[in-house]
Every structure is written in structure tokens, then in C-alpha cells.
Image (cartoon, coloured by chain):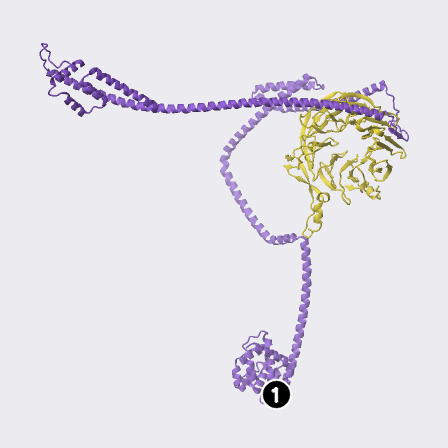
Chain colours: A yellow, B purple
Amino acid sequence: MNFSEVFKLSSLLCKFSPDGKYLASCVQYRLVIRDVNTLQILQLYTCLDQIQHIEWSADSLFILCAMYKRGLVQVWSLEQPEWHCRIDEGSAGLVASCWSPDGRHILNTTEFHLRITVWSLCTKSVSYIKYPKACQQGIAFTRDGRYMALAERRDCKDHVSIFVCSDWQLLRHFDTETQDLAGIEWAPNGCVLAVWDTCLEYKVLLYSLDGRLLSAYCAYEWSLGVKSVAWSPSSQFLAVGSYDGKVRILNHVTWKMITEFGHPATVNNPKTVVYKEAEKNPQLALGRLAFPAPRAAASPASNTESKYEIASAPVSLQTLKPIADRANPKIGVGALAFSPDNYFLATRSDSVPNAVWIWDIQKLRLFVVLEQLSPVRSFQWDPQQPRLAICTGGSKVYLWSPAGCLSVQVPGEGDFQVLSLCWHFSGDSMALLSKDHFCLCFLETEERVGTAFGRPGDHT
Amino acid sequence: MGEWMTVTDPDLSSESKNICQYTSETKMSPSSLYSQQVLCSSIPLSKNVHSFFSAFCTEENIEQSISYLDQELTTFGFPSLYEESKGKDTKRELNIVAVLNCMNELLVLQRKNLLAQENVETQNLKLGSDMDHLQNCYAKLKEQLETSRREMIGLQERDRQLQCKNRNLHQLLKNEKDEVQKLQNIIASRATQYNHDMKRKEREYNKLKERLHQLVMNKKDKKIAMEVLNYVGRADGKRGSWRTGKTEARNEDEMYKILLNDYEYRQKQILMENAELKKVLQQMKKEMISLLSPQKQKPRERADDSTGTVLSDAEEDAGELSRESLWDLSCETVREQLTNSIRKQWRILKSHVEKLDNQVSKVHLEGFNDEDVISRQDHEQETEKLELEIQQCKEMIKTQQQLLQQQLATACDDDTTSLLRDCYLLEEKERLKEEWSLFKEQKKNFEKERRSFTDAAIRLGLERKAFEEERASWLKQQFLNMTTFDHQNSENMKLFSAFSGSSDRDSLTVHSRPRQKKPHGVSNGSPVCTSKLTKSLPASPSTSDFCQTRSCASEHSSINVLNITPEEPKPNPVGREGTNQKWSMASRPGSQEGCYSGCSSTYRNSHVEKDDLP
């Protein structure tokens, strides 16, 4: 495993282009486009203000930079550097901006969710969509980019509108049986839309593309409900993580629950492998117990190397006691992700913040638990193979695959606190983001790393 | 009970009194007294009776008494005491026979009465005791009754209390229920109110939004705009189409197409899965049939009719199915047949397996028995053989062990040392190396020193030799000088001088001892001493110097010799050589004062030593 040099970055804005050729990163009001292989700067665009959001168009030709404070969106073209486009939402304000799947339309959500403006780069036409709902996940595009589902709120009732993306025609419009819709998500095959209610009520509704209600699922009542939802890449399973600390897997035939995965604080099954991260103590020889000791004690987690140890059967994990009288209690399954081959499901229970649970979907049982030394910030599957990258906000990045797991110290002077990470779609490299720096981590191909290192550094 | 008794007793006594009174009143006779007395005194004493009787009849009232008795007796039904009177006026005469009869009868009666009385008394006693017992019983029962009554009262009280409590609880429950109902109502009303409020708020919010929308959007906000250098082409290269009914229909069509595709895909998958499962089922069935067919003959032979028929049925079914399964059928009848046949065969298989299990267990049991029977006969022979073999094996093992131990004993030293050597860590090895080199160096140094020492020693020896030679020459000179003074000893001295060059210390010591033992004799007469010494001189030529000193001492002064003597008993720490030297030194000044200059220092030293050692 090799690392590139460290580049500057602001507000964690760093994204690979969908075709995997480019890497966009932001430094204050500048947008830097690099070649992924050589890391050379290809383009450098200067925006009008500090960039708050960037997004590649699906064909990797354009990139939009949103400056919410100013209500501005600037679009840049890679092919024609002199081409520019500026969208000003004016006094309506701007809270969200995204591409439509065709890469020729930009959807801007105005302040107070008054409307969504659809700007076209091809024609002068501007469309407006009224009544968008302010919620967690209100817009969802199908994988093939053909349809868009939008959560709406009209007359104190939740609705879902399905638009055809090619001409923004309303295809279906139906009200949902939800108290306060919290999110929508298309199945990867684009035929089923999962709709879930606010956390006050456990309710998952499944709608067909044509607006029929396929099924409604409710696991329990009178308690906090759904916290996270994830489709398996095959659209075969819908994993629903809830505040009771369980993940329920629904099948796509009957839309009933197949199994539920609890996240108890003790792992008793001896078949489950529990990897515990442990600090690698520098071996204290008799003569060597000297000055660096106090400094090492001051910052133990960040600098010392760590390794994984396999803990034997009954393992109790570190749990967090939630504060009961605060909103958004730290309980329940807050994050879940299926591996690209559908074989594994990675989850994180917020009450056991240091652990990542990996479930075997073929056998429907707990496969591996990774317990880190510090709370897990995020994890992401390699897009090509069952390989999970985890970061905890420390200077290490962790990788798990069915063969085992390892912890890698990010090299470089000073602390590189990995707050977030994103994979290149080939799975050969990933970007590690810290508060104001990022670097690339190359996993396999050696020659590529060589070129990356051979080049003179180009700090921006 | 006691109270009750006390109440009844007086009644009884009063009754008896009444009776007494009544009788006394009716009779009005002297006997009434008696009867009264009899009645009152429960047990009449014989004395009293006697006195009473004596008092009853006196001389004066015989007649009256008799008549009285007669009257009494007649009233009691006895014959009259008197003879039957012939006339009224005539005095009736006492009929003694009648009297005696009467008396006898009375006595008999008396006895009877006494008996009866006794009986009655015993009965009375019995009854009394019975009465007591009963009274006790009664008392006990009464007590029991009392306690139980009290218990009952207590229980009743408790019951009442519990009922009271129950009622209270019921009341409370009712209250709580009411409360809950009320709260629920409140909650519901609150909820509805909240919802209502929410809706109202939301409506207001929507209104505001609408208003804002109008204000913001309809103001022809110049700012809301898009600046584009030039419009780009669509990703698919086509031009945008107008929105018409046609496009709508087309969109619908596409949507349904997508859905259809999805469903078709799923159906295909399900069909495939089904086919696979069917295949598995078919295979299972076939295997079952093949498994069951070879041994179906046996059960038939063993006249297991029921299974046989079932098997044949199964066979038929299987045949049919295999024929039918040529079509990939999924209709219900076929499915039913298939599942039924499978179920049947499964049942058969199960029973068969169970049977097999039973057989196996039986066979096991039988087998054990058979083995036992057979082995008994050859058992002893076999055991003997085995024992012999064991013995042999043991011996073998022993010899092998011995050999091994021997080998080990020789080998183990090397092994252990090598092991130990291996045990050392690299560091230790290095340290040892260092130490080794240091040691070597030290050794070298030591050797150097030793060499220098030996050199020094050699040099010393040479010097000494030179010195001795010098001394010898000096002595020679001295001697020669002496000969000039004393001609008597000249010959002897000459002999001495001839031997003076070679000095044998051992012989010197040997000869010095006798000389030392006789210091007093020396003081008396030196000629004797010298003569003695001279005798031994040829054997010890090395003592020439000594002899010489002796001689000079004898010559010059005996004091010198006396001064020397105290030194002799002292054990010399320096060694023999030292003593000899001192001797020689000490003697020299005595012998020759002229050479003071050359040896003064040594002389002094020796002198100081002498002083220290008294």
C-alpha cells in the first residue's frame, strides 16, 4: 500500500469523476482538477466564493460548484476550459444543488424548500417543481437515470411525484401513508421505491414504479423507528436499521422480513471473528525507557501504530450510554452498506460506536466484528470487491476483507486525521480526506504509484 | 362452669331440706328426729344409733314403745307384735315370736338396705367421677368453643377488613381507570389539537411560502438568471422534444415496459429456481427408488406384506411420474402426485432405516454372544501366547531403553553444551567476546609484566652474583689481610678462601645451627669453638664468611658475638637468605671496623631490627 503526497483541501470537498479519470478537489474558492494517475493538475477554476458543494456530471464532462451562501452555482467544463455557466438563484436562496442524471440539467432547491428549479444547459428552458418536502432524502434518481422520485408535501399530506428525467414530465403522483415522510430510495433496478416515515414511527412503504403500494412494513409501534435504509445492489434485499439497534432484512418477493440482526454489546458466538484494534506498544528495552515516554503518553492514539488482535469467543464491546433527554439519541443502527457483490452487509450501531459489524448475507449471520480504538467515522465498500475501508478520525485507515484486516498508518509529517474516505471506482485507490488535506492511497498497482511519486509535488 | 355449679348446689340442699321438713311435719313422731338425723348425717354412726335406741326405750315407756313399734311395724306391713286380742279392753300381749320374726326380718331388711346403700354409694361415686369427667370434658369443650368462637370472630373481622380494603382498592382502581381515561382523553384531545395546530401552522407556513414565492419569484428578479457562454448539446445528441400527449403516452409505455421487464426477469429467475428444485427432487426420488429397490425383495421374502405392497405402489407411481416428468409439468395434479410419492417413499425409507437400526442392534447383541462362546475355548491358549509376547516385548523395551540411556549419557553432554551455547543470546555472545578480548589483553599485559619480572629477577641474580663475587674477592682480601695478623689460622683460612667462591646455602644453614646453639660456649672460649668449626669446614666450604667472622669475633672481642646471639631464636620473616645476609652483615663490622664505610647502612638496619626484637 502506497500513499501519495498530501494536498490541500477545504471542507472535505474531494471527488473522483464518474469515469475515474479525474479527481476534483476544492481549496477555498478554487477548484482543482487532477489526473487520477499522475495527480498532475489539469485544470484550475476559480469560483466567486468559497465552494460549499461540488458534483460531477454523470458523463464527467461538467462539474458544478455550489456556493449556498451566495445562492450561486457555477458550472465548469473539462473539455472547454473557457466555457462557463453561472446560475444565480437571487433572493430565493439556495440550499441544495444537484445534477440530473443526464448531466445537462441542474436541480436547485431554494431556501425554505419553496421550489426546485431545473436549469437546462441545453436550452433556455427553466422548469419549476413546487412543494418539495424538506426532509432527509427527498430526491432520488433511479440507477439508469430515467426517473426521479421527489417527496412532496401538499395540504399537510406527504406525496411522491415520479418524473421522467428526459423531459421532466410528471409520470405519477400519489400520496403516501406516512405521518411525516423522512426519506425515499429507489431500488437499484429502478422498479421499487422504498419510502420510510419519520423516526417517531416505524413504517417502511414500498411502491412500484407505477405508484402501486406493494407492501407496508412495520416492525413495532410506540417507539423510535427507522434510522437508516439500504438496498442490496441486486435489489433483492432491503436492509432497515432502526433505533432498537436491529437491522431487519426484507426480501423482494413477499416484502416480509427474512431475518433481523441484533447488535448486542457482547458477541458470544465462537464462530464470529472479533478483530480488536490494539496499540502496538514500542518494545521497552531496559536502556530505552527514556524521554519520549511523556510525549507518547500525551498523544497515544494518533501516533502509535496499531494492529488487530483476534479476541476469543465472549467479547464485550464498548458501549455508549445514550443521553435520554436529548434529541437524536446515539442509539440504533446509523449506517449500513451492502458490499458490491451482495455477500456482506456492514453496519454500525451508534450505541457501540467503535465497532463495525459485518454480516454474511448468504448465511444470514454475523460474520465479523471489528472493534476500533476510537469511534468509527465512516466506512465504504470497495466498488469492485468485498473490501471495506474504515476511518475513525485518527491517522490510520483500516481495511477489511474476508481474508483478514489491517490497519495502516498514513505517512507524512504531522497528524493526518482521516475524517472521510472515498474509493476510486476501480478499487485501486482511494482518497483519504482530513480537515484541510487529502491524499491518495494506492492499494495494488505498483507502477501507478511510482509515477505518482516520481512527479514533483504540486501543492495548490 | 364454676359459677353454674355454685348456683345449682344451694338449690339441691334446699330441696333436701324441704323434704326433711315435710317428713318431720307429717310424722310428728320421735322417729322423725331419728329420720331427720339419719337424713342429715349421711353416715349414721353405730354408737349414735345405739344411744338413740337406748334413749328410745326406758323402763317407764316399755308399753308405749312396744305399741309404738307395733304401730310402726304394722304400718310397714309387718304382723302385729301383739297377739290377737280377744277383747277390746283387754290388754294385748306381746307376741315374742312375732317380735323375733319382725326383728329378724328387720335385720334382713337392714342388711339388704346396707348392701343397697353400698351399691348406691359406689354407683354414686362412679357417677360422681363420671360427672367430674364429663364436667372436665364440658369445660374443655367450652374452652374450645370459646377459642374457636374467638377465632371465628377474628376471622370475621379480618374478612371484613379485607373486604373493606378490596372495596377501597376497587374504588381506587375505578378512580385510576377514570384518571387513565381522562388522561387518554386529554392526550387524544391534545394530539388532535396538536395535529390541528400543526396543520394550521403548516397551512400558514404554506401560505407564507406561497406568498414568499409570489414575492420572490414574480418580482421579475433580475438576479434569478443563468449565464451560459453557449448552450451545450444533449448527452444523447438529440434535440429536446415538445411535451405532448404523445410523449406522455410514450413515457407510460416505457414505464410499463420497464416494469414488465422486471417482472419477466423475476419470473424467469423463479422458473429457473423452480426447475432446479424440481431437478433436485427428481434426483432425490430416483436415488430413493434405487436405494429401496434392491432390498425390497428381502422384505418380501421375509413376508412383510404391508411394506411390499407400498413399495410396489411406489414403484408404479415412480414409473408414472418418470413418464410424466418428461413434460416439464408444473400443474397441480402432477405436483401433488410428485409430493405424495416422495412422501410415501420417504416414509418407507424412514421405516426401513428404523428397521435396519433395530437389526443392527440385534446383530450387535448376537454377535457379542457368539464371540463369547467361541473365545472361551481358545481363550487360555491365546492369553498365554499373548503374555509370552508381552514378556518378550518388555524385555526388548528394557534393553532398548538401556541402550538408549547409554547413548544418551554419552551424547547428552554434547547436547547440553550445545544447547547451552545456543541459549546464549547474541548480545551475551558479544559481551562475552568483548570480555574475552579484554581478558586476552590483560593476559598479554600480565605476560609482559611477568617477562619484565623475570628479567628483573635475572638481572637481580646477576647482580647478586656479581655482588657475591665482589664480596668473595673482598673477603679474600680481608683474609689475606688477616693472615698478616694471625699466622696460626693461616692454613685454615687459605682452605676457606679456596671454597669461598661457591656458596651452598643449605649446607650453610645446616652448619649454622650447631653454631647458633652454642653461643655461650663461644663466649667462654673461642679456640674451642673455632676448632670445632674448622673440623666441619671441609664439608661446608660456603660458610667461609661465617667462620671467618667467628674467628674475627673470637679474636677481637667476645661482646660482639654476644650481641649477635639474641637474634638467633627469632624466626626470620625475610627468609633464610635474609638471615644469612644479616648474619654476614652483622658480623662484618664486628670483624672489621675498617670497612664500615661500605656496609654501614645494612648494618644499621640489622641493628635496628635487633632492637625491635627483644
**Please, what secondary structure does the residue beneath circle 1 have?**
helix
* Residue B309 in the image: above or below residue A333: above
Rendering coords of residue A358 (x, y %): 70, 34
Q: Nearer the viewer, residue B331 or B114?
A: B114
| Chain letter of the residue carrying label 1 | B
Rendering coords of residue B176 (x, y %): 59, 23
| Residue at mark 1 | B482
The answer to whether residue B302 is left or right of residue A19 is left
Circle 1 Cα neighbour tier, 10 Å, few/some/many (<14 / 14–19 / ≥20): some
Tell me the quadrant of the picture where the C terminus of chain B can be found: bottom right
* Residue B279 in the image: above or below residue B70: below
| Residue type beneath disc 1 | Met
Q: Nearer the viewer, residue B356 or B163?
A: B163
Q: Residue at x 82, y 25 (%)?
A: B213
The answer to whether residue B610 is left or right of residue B221 is left
* Residue B408 in the image: above or below residue A19: below
Instruction: Identify the image quadrant of residue A88.
Output: top right
**Count of numbered tags:** 1
Tell me the quadrant of the picture where the N terminus of chain B can be found: top left
Rendering coords of residue B239 (x, y %): 89, 24
Q: Nearer the viewer, residue A42 or B120?
A: B120
Q: Residue furthest top?
A: B87
Instruction: Identify the image quadrant of residue A114.
Output: top right
Q: Is residue A152 visible?
A: no
The answer to whether residue A126 is left or right of residue A226 is right
